[in-house]
Image (tube, rainbow, N blue to C red):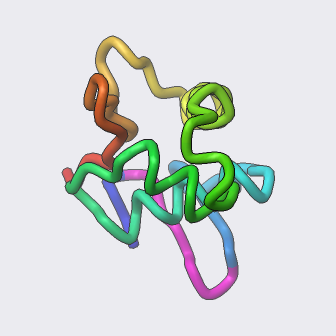
Amino acid sequence: MAVGPLQVDFAYRRVTLEGAEVALTRKEYAVLAALARHLGRVVTQQQLLKDIWGPTHVEDTHYLRVVVGHLRQKLGDDPASPRFLVTEAGVGYRLRDS
């Protein structure tokens, strides 16, 4: 799956940006992969939290905000003008499809 210079290889659990591998933690990869599987569509905070941290953490949005912040840093993404990770305020996140 590719979004411009960002590539997510699901088979090898590998992410590259402009050809260089991006080192991600398990949680960072899980969030990015979940968004990539729903490319261009909003994934709710609760769904991400349930799928990645488990059903007892659906209200723990700070976990998700921290991981998304780390992802943005590693991808060089600016939350004010995102190339990849878009925040849908009060709802969730989506990975741009172009």
Q: Is residue 95 on the magenta stretch?
A: no
- Residue 81 percent coordinates (x, y): 29, 18
Q: Residue furthest bottom?
A: 11
Residue drawn at point x = 57 percent, y = 50 percent: 49
Is residue 68 or residue 76 the one in the foreground? 68
Is residue 17 or residue 51 the one in the foreground? 51
Residue drawn at point x = 26 percent, y = 47 percent: 96
- Residue 23 percent coordinates (x, y): 77, 50
Can you tell which quarter of the image residue 3 is in?
bottom left
Q: Magenta residues, as a range?
A: 5-12
- Residue 34 percent coordinates (x, y): 48, 63
Horizontally, residue 41 falls left or right of residue 54, namely: left
Can you tell which quarter of the image residue 12 is in?
bottom right
- Residue 67 percent coordinates (x, y): 66, 36
Q: Is residue 10 on the magenta stretch?
A: yes
Residue drawn at point x = 56 percent, y = 58 percent: 50
Question: Looking at the picture, does residue 64 appear above or below residue 80?
Answer: below
Is residue 75 or residue 91 the one in the foreground? 91
